[in-house]
Image (spheres, grey):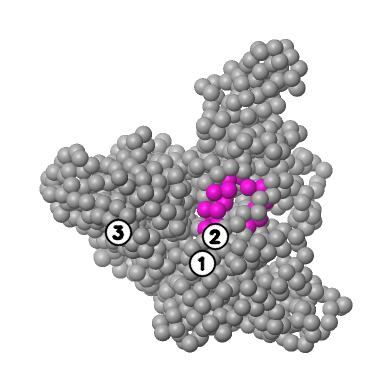
Amino acid sequence: MSAVAAVSRRQFIATGGALVVGFALAPHGALAQDRPAPLPGSLNTNRMLDGWLRIDPNGTVTILTGKIELGQGIGTALSQIAADELDVDLARIQVVSGDTARTPNEGQTAGSLSVEQSGTALRFACAEARDVLVSAAAVKLGVPAPELKVSDGTLMAPGGATATYWELAGSADLKREATAKAKPKPASEHRWVGHSVPRRDIPKKFTGGAAYVQDIRLPGMVFGRVVRPPSPGAELLSVEEAAVRRMPGVVAVVRDGNFLAVAAAREEQAIRAREALKTSARWKETAALPPDGDALYVHLMGLPVPGQTVAEKTSAAAAAPTKTLEALYTRPYQCHASMGPSCAVAQWQEGKLVVWTHSQGVFPLRAELAKVFDMRPQEIRCIHAEGAGCYGHNGADDVALDAALLARATGERPVKLQWMRDDEFAWEPYGSAMVMKLSGGIDRQGNVVTWSHELWSHSHSTRPGASAGVNLLAARHLATPRPLVPSADVPQPSGGSDRNAIPLYDFPNVRVVKHYIAEAPLRTSALRTLGGYANVFALESFVDELAGAAGADPVEFRLRHVKDSRARAVIEAAAQRAGWRPNARGDGARGRGFAFARYKNLACYCATAADVELDRKTGLVRVARVVAAVDAGQIVNPDGVINQIEGGIIQSTSWTLKESVRFDRTRVTTRSWADYPILRFSEVPEVEVVLLDQPSERFLGVGEGAQGPTAAAIANALANAAGRRLRALPFTPERVKRALI
Amino acid sequence: MASYTLRVNGKTVSVSVEPSTPLLYVLRNDLELNGPKFGCGLAQCGACTVLMDGKPVRSCVTPVAAAAKAQVTTIEGLGTLERLHPLQRAFIEEQACQCGYCGNGMVMSAKALLDRNPGPSELEIKRALDGHLCRCASHNRIVRAVQRAAREMRP
């Protein structure tokens, strides 16, 4: 999460008004008299109507968004919102997204905030644009505006006279600041929102269309590859550049400090040249990595990083606990492991730089490229083109700098640079390893009276813009390295390392403490949910442990401790759909588990029930079925929501059962899919999703809602099956055999 | 450099490249076909899958020399936006992807499966696709898409 995104999120909360906490936490400056009136969503930071949409005389509407498509279907969802507010057919909507020369700056596409921020902005901007167009038509047709009816961009007066948006495009002035005074439509009048409209990006993806940055071909383009150091901190002593320059097709070799890259006329030539450089390069390496395995967690907890209190609540009225428990949960470093290694195309012309990138934030990327090249941001244009799914901050931004550095050596010829598989595994920023120490107590009635959650974690946000330094990988490898400034943790209420560490349950005494370890020998950043996955895994596992101590059914125990009616509704719906049987015990080989969270304690509500099967001979855990119930507020595209939740459940199943980055004291040893197995077809659970639509509620982000609850439901199901609990992720057969059988 | 005559999607084309050049780069860069994707270069993920004489192969590790005598089919050779192959239509109708980067390989291996087994069971579909990785986790939709296509293709 960049600072930009963090600010706009706070402002969104403030303007939404629904969350008084968010408002109260805003800095005092936000309330200063000279600030313009707050506007909804990203309208607040991009206030001109024509920044959001354009009516084209050819009968189309172009919407402009700073949020980008990463396979989550955002282009389709935003089109649905715009079409409804404007009263035009969905087919008329064109989408331009993530282009520093054309679109609003909405920071990062992250945090499951795109519909909340961009969707809300477009909703109000389009409603207001419709008013402007209706007023212009009223003047033209000489009738009062309220008498005009709009259908697919045609305005009709009671007498039958008509005008169209397309005729009015020239005269209707959208070059004005938004007021957000035009009221968006109620859900009952929506024609597109609330329906499973097919995604607009999918047909080209199954017919060989140019759908990705990898598919960009420019005249004179050459192919680039980068030669990364063998380990973090390694120094390049020597490399045989001259011999590689003579290899077939090689156009340029760039060596700048520890940054090494090559461009060639053909892609396979660039790959061969990369191999040759790798073979001849001599590096000085240092053993700077932490210990792997269980020792890693001891190491993290032993670092001299004081705890900071994240939340504290005390109630003198609560009874003293009659039974207390304590448990330690761990999560290893995990990869984004995008299917397509990161890629960018860069071209320098007359001292200006254009980069085609699958970055999640083209504006923050531009700002950091400007720092590296000592240019004004206006001299750089970053244009988004889709990449393979990224699930957070992977190598997307880094490869953009790699391509730009290499393209300086190819004249004005554009360079397409794609990382190799090992570049991605070894150098993407990982989801941080974490330790969660939970303790709590129950009273005589079996109610929770004390709760403590203490965690250790590195950063979950080192994206471009997250700190004052340059957060691009190659910047630290250059002969004149750009300073790396450790980033601060993402603050509450959304939280970073402590995301979802504050329980939503009504426990009378709560203490949440984080040890935020800013210095990280292995690079870490935002992986889907940030700290939420591990914190929910721990929190919801420990709820089950306390329920067990109280002799209570896990679902009943949760309902007993939560008042929020929307939370209760998803818990009840998931239990019902799963056919939950209270107090059912596993039989040693099969078990069922339950979990709940509201993502960030701010976004969608999600409850899950998982069925697992344990092979006692091999230690293999199979997740047979996961049921989820979700409340995402008003749903724009139900199938889109289901797709996100299904994907989140299965991806989290993979994280939970299989995934951890391996390394020795010097090098990352995870280099290919053989070293980093993920869930395969034969291992994928059956998934059912129940949507609790709330058409009168505001949008709640959904892309990261299921991951935490899925992990905890699997952990609880495994404990239910085996009668003993595993608290260390992932649940590999070796670990399961060692701990449970 | 050597010259190769390839038969790709029913057309005959000539390219002049090193014999060890992976077929993938010839398809993507010389023939400008976007379908096959670079995913790993190690035959581990399946994103680069094409058919050679009807059999799925990983084009990232198949030397162009080995493809010279075969009929090569890429996803572009199955159908177009205007005339979709039933598998392409089924993947679109089932919305069987998020990012879609793996989709090419899924469709191509499913094509080979349905050609040899027009009515596969769910298990047979999962087995046929087990060597293909999908990170967005659209697996269940992909299985449904193959089942839908199988239904539609049945005479």
- Work out whether residue B89 can be spotted: yes
> Which residue is drawn at the image coordinates 63% and 16% (left, top)?
A163
- Classify mark 1: residues with Cα within 10 Å, few (<14), some (14-19) or many (20+): some
Residue bearing the label numbered 2: A688
- Work out whether residue A434 can be spotted: no
Q: Which quarter shows the N terminus of chain A? A: bottom right
Question: Which mark is nearer the camera, 3 or 2?
Answer: 2
Q: Is residue A147 left or right of residue A575?
A: right
Contact flag, marks 3 and 2 (Cβ < 8 Å): no
Give the alpha-carbon distance from disc 3 to disc 2, as whole Å. 35 Å
Magenta stretch?
A630-646
Residue bearing the label numbered 3: B41
> Which residue is drawn at the image coordinates 71% and 42% (left, top)?
A40
Residue A148 horizontal/vertical position (percent): 70, 20
Q: Which of the two residues, A386 or A238, is positioned nearer the viewer here?
A: A386
Residue bearing the label numbered 1: A625
